[in-house]
Amino acid sequence: MPRDFLSLTTQVRVPSGYVLGLAYILFSQPDSFSLAVGVLIALPGLLLRGWASGHLEKNVRLATTGPYACSRNPLYLGTLLLGVGFAIAGGTLLLGAAFLLVMLFIYWPVMRQEEAALISRFGRDYRTYASTVPLFWPRLKASPAATGPFQWTRYRKNREYQAAAGFTGAVLFLCLKLWLR
């Protein structure tokens, strides 16, 4: 992938989330069923992100434990579940499709860019890890050697509590929007 494209995807990743969030606020039309189903899909995404952040020490140690034993990008996989879940919860097929396009055209290249940085930083250790753990879609069975403790200090340092607050706020927002209909 051209370097300019990768740079652009990194720069638009966060702003694209804000644009989608604003559109979601304006156009979501939840009903009781879509809200229940969507939250049931989004919640595992939130839990996966939280679990992953408790195993991640960015730029210090190669994360291979917890969900990183099944997927090299469990945070992005959790983001996918959250996005799909909230698209369903908000009854917004068009925004759900837009979210999937953002995942494909922005997050996928970012994953590849981050992979190059990890190869540069961790070399052979990362290549060995990458040879047995899929980039995104998880394998169902982790290696027994890939166990390690979840650490709340990592969770807090990675500020994953912000995702939990956002999840709670979004659910409350959808409940309010449903109630006001």
Image (cartoon, grey):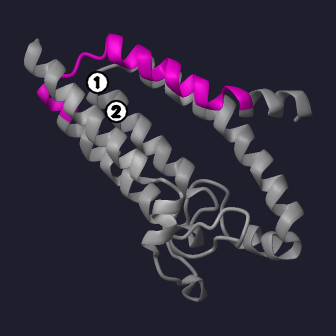
On residue 25, the disc is none
- The N terminus lies in quadrant: top right
In depth, the one of 1 and 62 nearer the eye is 62
Separation (CA) of disc 2 from disc 1: 6 Å
| Residue 135 quadrant | bottom right
- Mark 2 near mark 1, Cβ–Cβ under 8 Å? yes
In depth, the one of 39 and 133 nearer the eye is 39
For disc 2, the marked residue is: 86
Residue 110 place in picture, x, y as percent: 72, 41
Is residue 116 at least partly visible in the picture?
Answer: yes
Q: Is residue 170 left or right of residue 175?
A: right
Q: Amino acid at mark 2?
A: Phe
- Residue 90 vertical position relative to residue 163 in the rendered view, above or below: above
Secondary element at tag 1: loop
Residue 2 lies in magenta, yes or no? no
Q: What range is drawn magenta here?
A: 11-35
On residue 90, the disc is 1
Secondary element at tag 2: helix
Q: Amino acid at mark 1?
A: Gly
